Amino acid sequence: MAREQGGRSDRGRGRDRDDRDSEFVDKLVHINRVAKVVKGGRRFGFAALVVVGDQKGRVGFGKGKAREVPEAIRKATEQAKRQMIRVPLREGRTLHHDVAGRHGAGRVYLRAAPPGTGIIAGGPMRAVFETLGMQDLVAKSIGTSNPYNMVRATFDALTREQSPRMVAARRGLKVSDVVSRRSDASSEALEDAE
């Protein structure tokens, strides 16, 4: 066959791409109907906000605009897959430390939580954490309730998240040194409180 390369046909390559795409979970966060006034009346379009993640620490968001809802969602999903970020998770379930993020008038605060807490967060932020694969987290949004700004502020906070391994690499130390210093500092704070 002329279409085969390396023992695989075009259909095989398409199936591999579908398998790779199926590892992602996508959630529609918000859909907005917009109208453009033209000579003959109004022309309607749709804007979609979608969050995509692999539930293993990677997440992205995208916006798409089109005349039909499915096309807007497809565009947003493709953009989200192109703009994914990796977030370090502690034990694969929560954040390493508390962090704040902001975008425009939107401010969010994310706090690490003990096992069994679940995701305590509002709508757009909850979609981000569920697609990220986070299990325990407490989040608070202050300021805007605009889903676009809430999602952007959440991503701002997640990009500020650092694991002990990242801090150790930046300082030229071992991970055990960074973690032991953190536990020493917390025990000193407890002694001072007593």
Image (cartoon, rainbow, N blue to C red):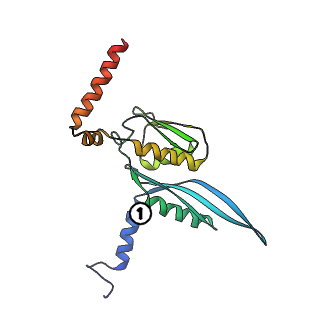
Q: Residue 173, image x and y in percent?
A: 21, 37
Q: Residue 128, image x and y in percent?
A: 48, 48
Left or right of 123, for residue 55: left
Q: Nearer the viewer, residue 49 or 55?
A: 49
Q: Indicate the quadrant containing the N terminus: top left, top right, bottom left or bottom right.
A: bottom left
**Label 1 environment density (alpha carbons within 10 Å; few <14, some 14–19, many ≥20):** few
Q: Residue drawn at (41%, 63%), measured in percent from left and top?
A: 21
Left or right of 55, for residue 27: right
Q: Taking 149 as reference, is 191 above or below it?
A: above
Q: Taking 12 as reference, is 176 above or below it?
A: above
Q: Is residue 75 visible?
A: yes
Q: Residue 81, image x and y in percent?
A: 44, 60
The residue furthest top is: 194
Inspect the image, locate mark 1, and give the three-letter code of the amino acid beneath it.
Asp
Q: Indicate the quadrant containing the C terminus: top left, top right, bottom left or bottom right.
A: top left
Q: Residue drawn at (31%, 88%), measured in percent from left and top?
A: 2
